[in-house]
Image (cartoon, rainbow, N blue to C red):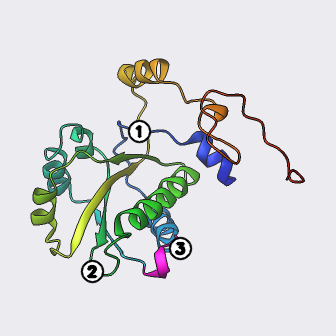
Amino acid sequence: MEVFEAIQRRKSVRAYAPTLVPREKLERILEAARLAPSAENRQPWYFIVVTNPEKRKRIAKSGRFAGFLEESPVVIVGCGDRKASPKWHVVDVAIAMQNMVLAATAEGLGTCWIGSFNEGLVRRLLKIPERLKVVALLAVGYPRKKPDLMAKIVHFIRRKKKLDKIVGFEEYKGNAPNVYPGPNAR
């Protein structure tokens, strides 16, 4: 699958089949994170792969919108090392996790980025040292066919913005016409 195709196909999956994720696929997803760029190449990340059902259940109860993590066969906990990169650890972990999302999509897996969790609970449960900040959680698994009415409503109400609404060439354009000047423009 081409990168742009993975970007187009990616969606937040909140219902997972009980099928286990093959180790080879999981390793390619983690390798995609390892290859991510980071400020000064400090690589201030550490990823904890959680497959234990009891731990996933406890993590799922730690956040208002995290309940479906219980059925996700894999939860990846993305942590950033505050000492290795005090200013950029969160951004660097986010970039690496986005690489994982795209790699998982290319592998035929679904993902959902989770920001709703109790960091203290996750930290205690997984024995995460204080120098690491839990940045985000990533559910990974095979999507289960389940109608997600809420997702359909949200996507109908909040469609993706048009490119000309989010990009300005050379300066902020607001609602003004926005035309790419081309490679030879001065």
In the image, which residues are magenta? 35-42
Residue at mark 2 to residue at mark 3: CA–CA distance: 21 Å
Q: Amino acid at mark 3?
A: Leu
Residue 162 location in percent, x, y?
A: 63, 30
Left or right: 186, with 123 as reference point:
right
Nearest the viewer among 123 and 178 is: 178
Predominant SS along the magenta part: loop
Q: Residues within 10 Å of mark 2 (few under 14, many from 20)?
A: few
Residue 15 location in percent, x, y?
A: 35, 36
Task: Name the residue carrying label 2.
Answer: 83
Q: Amino acid at mark 2?
A: Lys
Task: Name the residue carrying label 1.
Answer: 13
Mark 2 or 3: in front is: 2
Q: Quadrant of residue 165?
A: top right
Number of the label disc, if any, that sits on residue 134 = none
Mark 3 or 1: in front is: 3
Task: Name the residue carrying label 3.
Answer: 35
Q: Amino acid at mark 1?
A: Val
Nearest the viewer among 168 and 76 is: 168
Residue 153 location in percent, x, y?
A: 41, 18
At horizontal 10% and vertical 57% (from top left) the residue drawn is 121
36 part of magenta stretch? yes
